[in-house]
């Protein structure tokens, strides 16, 4: 367990340290490490965590760190109270770099924000973060989240429909994410997805 | 000190949907009600917090805490912002564990999953706009996405590589083209 806790701490410390571009970009990093690298949970479980993190109070980065820390421990077969320790470690680790960096560079960055070096770094960083987000969305489009034509055609078509519905509802009708999540969840129950 | 904690606890508790949704609330509480920072200072803080790594709302709370009470204030504010998340998620995680096998809960989450993917896909376009993607740099997000998606490269590595190459490009190559 000590190994798992150390890995959790290390992973979320790095995510906090390199997590540029807000909560959604962080989700891409968490996905890469937690599902892709360490296999602490499946893509489906991860998607559930993202859904819950989006619809509960607080920043998405903190919410998902807390939830992933809990799930990683519980999935590894430990009791729920060890899961709480996992939550604490992951949340603490993701905030720690912010804390140290803010104390160190708040003055520096305030002064040099428009300096050409800082500008240069960000001129490449910003487009890359867009790529990060795109990759997160593409990776989530798998058979665990959508099913597949061969496995369950009904669920697959409905999933595609709900995907398009959520996309258009947010883009065109500007519905809030929580409303969209609840509507799609209810549709899942009613249609027996 | 308790004021700092209380204010950021409220901000953490009453915002749903991520850091940017917090800006209006932070503005009202910290600028209008408490007058801890001026409107202009807050705008600067937002710009800096955006360009720093880490969680946006936490960065802002650390900044304001730091300004009010030094290191101790930064610590208290950060805890205040994180605590509501932490408690809510733990409560949900403990309860969800028991209902996981329930048929209706399962259907509910099967309906939610495609929606979550859509909710993540949309900010791609929004961010592409604010990152000023043009036909000269559109290859950057495409290559980054491909490396992560198909070759399993860690996003952490991508961020590091992009930052370093931006630095190198700007320092050693851009001048050669006279810009």
Image (spheres, coloured by chain):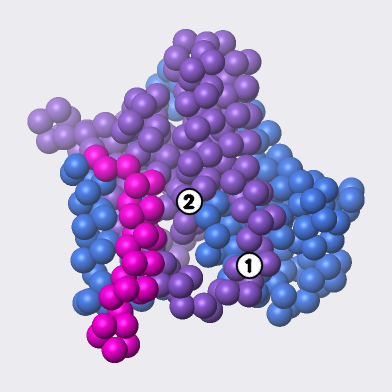
Please tell me if label 1 and label 2 are on a single chain: yes
Q: Quadrant of residue A2?
A: top right
Residue on which the image places disc 1: A108
| Residue at 42 percent of width and 52 percent of height | A25
Position of residue A85 in the picture relative to residue A9 (left or right): right
Q: From the viewer's perspective, is residue B37 above or below residue A84? A: below
Picture quadrant of residue B82: top right
Mark 2, residue position: A19
Measuring from the top left, give residue B91's x and y in whole percent.
Answer: 64, 28
Chain on which label 1 sits: A
Quarter occupied by the C terminus of chain B: bottom left
Residue at 21% over, 34% down: A143
Give the left or right position of residue A49, taking residue B76 as reference: left
Q: Nearer the viewer, residue A115 or B40?
A: A115
Location of residue A158 in the rendering, given as x and y in whole percent from the top left corner: 24, 42
Does A147 sit left or right of B37 as displayed? left
Residue drawn at (74%, 43%) of the image: B79
Magenta-tinted stretch = B152-179
Q: Colour of chain B?
A: blue
Q: Which chain, by letter, is purple?
A: A
Look at the numbered disc 1 and give the secondary structure of its residue.
Answer: helix
Q: In the picture shown, does residue B120 fall above or below A190? A: below
Residue B133 locus on image (x, y percent):
31, 73
């Amino acid at each position: 367990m000590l190994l798992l806790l150390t890995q959790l701490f290390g992973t979320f410390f790095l995510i906090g340290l390199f997590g540029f571009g807000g909560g959604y970009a962080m989700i891409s990093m968490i996905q890469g490490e937690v599902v892709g690298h360490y296999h602490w949970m499946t893509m489906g479980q991860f998607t559930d965590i993202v859904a819950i993190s989006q619809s509960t109070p607080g920043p998405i980065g903190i919410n998902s760190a807390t939830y992933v820390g809990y799930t990683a421990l519980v999935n590894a077969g430990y009791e729920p109270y060890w899961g709480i320790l996992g939550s604490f470690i992951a949340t603490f680790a993701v905030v720690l770099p912010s804390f140290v960096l803010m104390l160190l560079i708040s003055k520096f960055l305030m002064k040099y924000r428009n300096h050409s070096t800082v500008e240069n770094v960000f001129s490449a960083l910003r487009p890359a973060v867009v790529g990060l987000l795109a990759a997160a969305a593409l990776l989530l489009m798998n058979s665990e989240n959508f099913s597949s034509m061969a496995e369950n055609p009904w669920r697959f078509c409905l999933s595609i429909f709900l995907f398009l519905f959520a996309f258009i509802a947010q883009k065109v009708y500007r519905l809030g994410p929580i409303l969209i999540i609840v509507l799609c969840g209810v549709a899942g129950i009613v249609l027996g997805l | 000190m308790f004021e700092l904690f209380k204010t950021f606890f409220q901000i953490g508790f009453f915002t749903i949907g991520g850091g940017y949704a917090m800006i209006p609330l932070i503005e009202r509480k910290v600028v209008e009600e408490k007058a801890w920072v001026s409107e202009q200072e807050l705008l600067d803080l937002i710009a800096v917090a955006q360009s720093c790594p880490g969680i946006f709302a936490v960065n802002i709370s650390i900044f304001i805490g730091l300004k009010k009470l030094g290191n101790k204030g930064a610590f208290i504010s950060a805890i205040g912002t994180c605590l509501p998340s932490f408690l809510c998620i733990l409560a949900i995680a403990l309860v969800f564990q028991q209902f996981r096998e329930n048929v209706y809960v399962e259907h509910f989450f099967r309906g939610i999953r495609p929606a979550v993917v859509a909710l993540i896909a949309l900010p791609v376009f929004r961010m592409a706009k604010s990152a000023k993607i043009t036909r000269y740099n559109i290859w950057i997000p495409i290559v980054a996405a491909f490396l992560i998606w198909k070759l399993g490269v860690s996003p952490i590595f991508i961020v590091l590589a992009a930052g370093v190459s931006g630095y190198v490009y700007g320092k050693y190559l851009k001048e050669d083209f006279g810009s």
